Image (cartoon, rainbow, N blue to C red):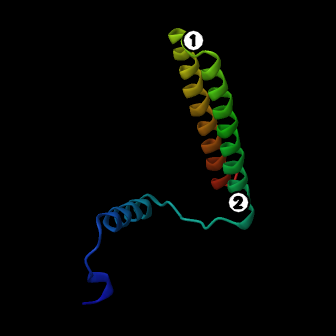
């Protein structure tokens, strides 16, 4: 049995469909340059540092507000929003780098 006719996993089938769709739409896949890889790694490192810093601040705030349910709820909401913002900023930066802008 030739390699092309070997059974494929669901992941491989999905990837093949996506590649065909991209080809049909004229999307050209370009490999990343070394500079882009380095910039993406730096963006990820900065994002992870931001998340770690925010988590440390969150833990301190939780300890100070222990027992106050309203304050804890507010702290949790702020923490969630801050994490979402940091992840969003990181992902937008990576998207911009991949786009070559």
Residue 50: where, in percent of width, then height?
Answer: 69, 38
Q: What residue is shown with label 1?
A: 71
- Quarter of the image for residue 92 reads top right
Relative placement, left or right, of 91 versus 20 is: right
Instruction: Categorize mark 2 by other alpha carbons within 10 Å: few (<14), some (14-19), many (20+).
Output: some
Q: Residue at x 70, y 36 (%)?
A: 53
- N-terminal of the pair, mark 1 or mark 2, is 2
Residue 47: where, in percent of width, then height?
Answer: 67, 43
Asked if residue 67 is positioned above or below residue 78 in the image, the reply reads above
Q: Residue at x 54, y 22 (%)?
A: 76
Asked if residue 79 is positioned above or below residue 25 in the image, the reply reads above
Q: Dot 1 lies on which element?
A: helix
Q: Residue at x 61, y 15 (%)?
A: 65
Looking at the picture, tell me which residue is in the foreground, 81 or 90. 81
Q: What residue is shown with label 2?
A: 36
Residue 26: where, in percent of width, then height?
Answer: 47, 61
């Amino acid at each position: 049995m030739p390699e092309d006719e070997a059974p494929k996993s669901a992941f491989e089938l999905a990837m093949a469909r996506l590649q065909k769709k991209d080809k049909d739409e004229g999307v050209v896949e370009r490999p990343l340059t070394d500079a882009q890889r380095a910039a993406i790694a730096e963006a990820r490192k900065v994002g992870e540092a931001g998340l770690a810093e925010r988590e440390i601040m969150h833990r301190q705030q939780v300890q100070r507000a222990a027992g106050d349910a309203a304050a804890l709820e507010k702290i949790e909401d702020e923490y969630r929003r801050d994490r979402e913002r940091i992840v969003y900023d990181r992902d937008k930066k990576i998207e911009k780098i991949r786009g070559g802008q």
